[in-house]
Image (spheres, helix red, strand yellow):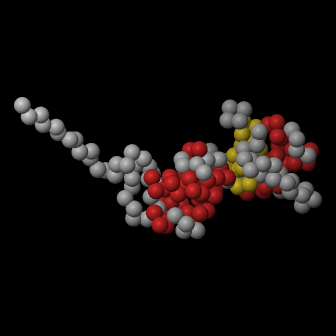
């Protein structure tokens, strides 16, 4: 069922409670710990139960329907969760704009300026969404055309030169 208009959105629970579209499963994944679910008003619990099932193995709520995700997204928004992003979403945004991202020191430095974290693996869905939105707004376009530098300072694709030392007798 559609979220009822008389259910008012909850105050956002916490900046870590996000929902994303899990591309592998084709379902909405709601990151809301079970103990936080227990604190929700009964009408919000009923709404979540109607659209999601608790997945013990993953520790997340998964939408019941993989073909119609808008109802699950609306339910998540109603309880105060925010839309997030995945690493793949960030990669797709960077590819579309021609921004280098894979093992690119400039991209990692830029990400650290945006989020205080250098690696996408360390970001929560909200922070990933922040990075994705910034890329889509063109804020990372200054990285286009830069030679990908690995954290070691080596240029990607460049062979390391071995220094030969000659000892004279």
Q: Residue at x 67, y 35 (%)?
A: 58
Q: Is residue 139 above or below residue 62?
A: below
- The part of the image, by quadrant, that contains residue 74 is bottom right
Residue 109 in percent (x, y) is at 51, 54
Residue 63 in percent (x, y) is at 73, 46
Q: Pick the residue in front: 122 or 89.
A: 122
Q: Could one spot residue 116 in this view of the protein? A: yes
Does residue 95 appear left or right of residue 161 in this picture? right
- The part of the image, by quadrant, that contains residue 164 is top left
Residue 101 in percent (x, y) is at 47, 55
Q: Residue at x 12, y 37 (%)?
A: 166
Q: Could one spot residue 46 in this view of the protein? A: no
Q: Quadrant of the C terminus?
A: top left
Q: Pick the residue in front: 28 or 165.
A: 165
Q: Residue at x 78, y 48 (%)?
A: 14
Farthest residue, direction front? 169
């Amino acid at each position: 069922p559609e979220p009822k208009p008389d259910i008012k959105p909850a105050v956002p629970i916490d900046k870590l409670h996000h929902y994303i579209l899990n591309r592998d499963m084709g379902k909405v994944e709601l990151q809301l710990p079970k103990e936080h679910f227990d604190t929700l008003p009964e009408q919000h619990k009923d709404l979540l139960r109607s659209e999601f099932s608790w997945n013990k193995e993953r520790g997340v709520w998964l939408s019941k329907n993989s073909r119609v995700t808008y109802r699950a997204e609306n339910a998540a928004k109603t309880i105060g969760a925010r839309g997030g992003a995945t690493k793949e979403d960030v990669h797709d945004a960077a590819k579309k704009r021609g921004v280098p991202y894979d093992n690119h020191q400039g991209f990692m430095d830029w990400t650290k300026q945006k989020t205080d974290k250098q690696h996408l693996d360390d970001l929560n869905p909200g922070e990933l969404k922040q990075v994705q939105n910034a890329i889509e707004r063109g804020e990372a376009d200054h990285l286009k055309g830069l030679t990908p530098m690995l954290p070691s300072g080596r240029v990607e694709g460049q062979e390391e030169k071995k220094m030969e030392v000659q000892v004279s007798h």
